[in-house]
Image: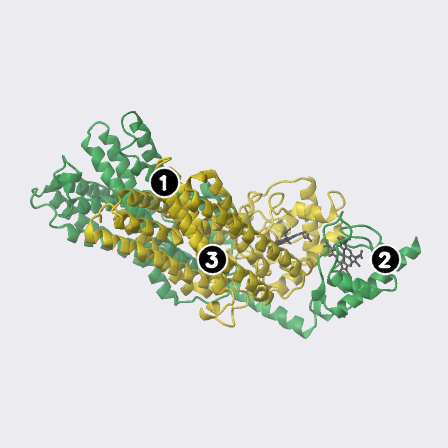
Amino acid sequence: MILALMQTPVPRDIDLPLPVGDFELKLLLVVLFLVHIFFVNLMVGGSLLSVFFEILGLSAGRYDKLAKKITETITVNKSLAVVLGVGPLLCINLVYTLHFYSANSLTGYAWISIVPLVALAFLLAYIHKYTWEIWTGTKKQLHVLVGVFSGLLFLFVPFIFLSNANLMLFPGEWHKVTGFFSSLRVGNVFPRYFHFLSASLALTGLFLAGWFGRKRYPVEKYLPGFPRAELRRLFYRIAFYLTLAQLAFGPLLLFTLPFEGLSRELFLLILLGILIAVAVLLALRWEIRSPDEKIGRLYIGICFLFSLIVLAMGTGRHVYREVSLAEHKKLVEEASIDFRALETATRLSIEAGYGAGEAVTVELTGERVFLNCAACHAVDRVLAGPSLEEIYFLYDGDPKGIADWARAPGRKRTEFAPMPAFAHLGDEKLRLVADYILEKGGEAALNQ
Amino acid sequence: MDFPIFFLDFFGNRMLIAVIASVHVFISHGLAVGAYPVVTLLEWRGWRKKSEEWDNLAYKITFVLFIVTTSVGALTGVGIWLSTSLIAPFGIGSLLRIFFWAWFVEWFVFVIEVVLIVIYFLTWKRWKEGAKKKLHIGFGAFLSAFSWITMVIITAILGFMMGSGVWPESRSLFSAIANPLYLPQLAFRTSYAMIISGLLTWFLIFFFTKRGTDFRRRAVRFASTWILAWVPLFVVGSFWYWNKAPEAMRANIDVALLTQRFAQWHETLALIIAVAVIAIVIVALVGVIRPRMIPGIALLIPLVLGVWLLGHFERVREFIRKPYIIADYMYSNGVTVSELQVFQRDGILPYATYVRNQNVTDNNMVEAGRDVFLVTCTRCHTTTGINGVVSKFNNLYGEESWDESAMTALIHTMHISRTFMPPFPGNDREAEALTAYLRSLRSNPELILDAHAGWARRSSSGTPSMAGADGRKR
């Protein structure tokens, strides 16, 4: 632990207060994030299921129609997933500025590639949707391929987000990270990923069971060959098996979490989630086994329980984050306070004028003002502008001419870049520097 | 600035933001704000004339709008957040604390707009007859109005945030609307959006109608009439803006230095406006009178001029930005005004967490100079690429004689001779190290691709600012 801390960077935090209370912001973060992730789940799950059923449809025609109808749900879900992502992004940027941005920077190239990758995934998803009836026959394979490719992008991008959400929790590991791929070695990105993926599929299953199963959906028209009850059962099954899988992925996630962030609250929340999940599983099984005319009666109840699970898990995620960052946040706060004190001390000592840097205490001389010109003018050499010697021959006895020039330089020698104006130095400084230039330039001229 | 350093060498950090933001602004003007009224009008026309042709054209154009705005448009919107937080985490993190509610409102408006466009497009084929069709057209009108109001709000928020000097004295959003540039800017942006959308619509007509048909002729005439109708406001808006700009900007630019560049910018702006107006009027007039005479390629001329105009228009930020991200509080390299004093006395490296060397010694001049470069220059400069530091010095000193003491002097005074750069936040030793690094970079040009990594490898002389061995307390 001590050793790990030695490697932990302790930066200074941003020196401005939060615009909203800490608690309110965190509440907002958790709620907005869950809304966002809901649509993300439907987007990812939908695109995977659509590809799956389309491939199934290559041999069993009716699945092709089903795949198309699933694809159509993605349009809205993905648009909402993106715009609703900005709200929680703003919140996390605020509450965890230092940790989140640091993780972003460490995986910077991957982080910024989210923009083109998701745009591409969306465009492919549109092609996939709108060429469904056009790319048939020999072009069907191409069509499937487009779907597969966009599905792969939807599978990959969550890795970038998860690697960041994960990396921000472990400042002690940051020094090992050289980019996105090495960030995957920190913490437990892969268990998180599988947990997310199976949650996406389970949620999409549940969603589609309701979407196709609702009374107002014209199944006979859109999906001939699928009785409503069969559709319900099919998607209930998907929800069932993937929720079951969560009973494996969940504990895997929990037991691979680095122990820093573990707490009793976390275990309680997760236990609660598991209990509800068991109830959901039982209800799903009951539904799947009930006769055609009765299936669907528990749907609302299952959705309600399911959202409770999501809430428990989302809160658990937050609790873990808080605990695992608590110690580091404290160190950062101390370092920041120390630094602010140093800032104040520095300012005071400079204002008081003792023991401070020269900047304030030295008197104003031509030599000092000339520092502004020294980047381009030297006594007897040509730098980025003529030498002082040359200027001396031009302006001997005319310091005002130099000051006038410096205030608003003209353009004579095209071999140089133009000289910037120095009117803002003020008349007094310009007069001092003009005298200084003539003095030095004159000396150099004499020495020749 | 105490974040791991993201540095997109060669292409440049600022270029990354500029590209993402420009694409976003162009899409939001030309394919959203200006385009919804066009398609609504088309739809309305089809309904009144009971003509499937018009309705179909409107639908197809909306299809394009929908695809582009909900993919590239939406993602570049998010991309502005992602890129700025990589490049200026200190700045965006601080601004967020100041402008949280403004941004929250902006986000909310953005969500509603996306929901509206999704509904408008997806219900098109379902709300086809009678009252439902009327409702749909009404919805289009509502969407058009709403997206324009979005622009009204966002222009205010932008003015509010970008106007330097507004913080911390006056924090009211009304001060943004009271800004003398607000109304001209709104007139300019509105008419600009309408005209660009007219051009884009016209362009799409070539894809969605058959060559030589009477319908294409009528559709082209519609688009060009639409464009012509907005030209007067465009002329008024842009010259109004052009007229007001110097006065409004002079309040921000108190440094005489910039007036020269500003005058140049101002002249060029007038020129581009004039050329763009003439090109647009000619193309649109011919479109009204002889719709068949304009080939698709000819439309590229006013379109390109339009892009150029918007680019030039937005570049004004360069002039008023000064070296600050937040006026009188934080410089654009992330150093705050009060940190600066400490850094200029003790150097910045001892206080930088994410650098490889925390002190300059005789043995690590180049290596430490690289760190100084990364921390203090890379928010704006690349090594050898776009706005590369090597070429900047070459412009000044030529390729040969990079005089060390002159360079060090320049580094210390760069904020005075070039007021868009912040003061160098380091001490003499660090300026010398930076010079050493820059000179070695010239003879051995090498991109830096791993700025964010490797900082844990510290030189033995460094005092790591890690917990336990705290280099800060002195």
Work out whether disc 3 and disc 1 sit on a shared chain: yes
Give the CA separation, mark 1 to mark 2: 71 Å
**Front residue of A10 and B46:** B46
| Marker count (numbered) | 3
Instruction: Using a 10 Å C-alpha cutoff, classify the residue at mark 3 as few (fewer than 14 neighbours), some (14 to 19) or many (20 or more).
Output: few
The chain letter for the residue carrying disc 2 is A
Q: Which mark is residue A382?
A: none
Residue A154 placement (x, y as % from top left):
35, 41
Local crowd size for mark 2, using a 10 Å CA cut-off: few (<14), some (14–19), many (≥20): few
Nearest the viewer among B339 and B356 is B339
Q: Residue at the spot x=83%, y=65% of the render?
A: A399
Q: Which mark is residue A394?
A: 2
**Which residue bears the numbered disc 3?**
B232
Q: Which residue extends farthest top?
A: A138
The disc label shown at residue B216, or none: 1
Q: Chain letter for mark 1, please.
A: B
Mark 3 or mark 2, whichever is nearer to me = 3
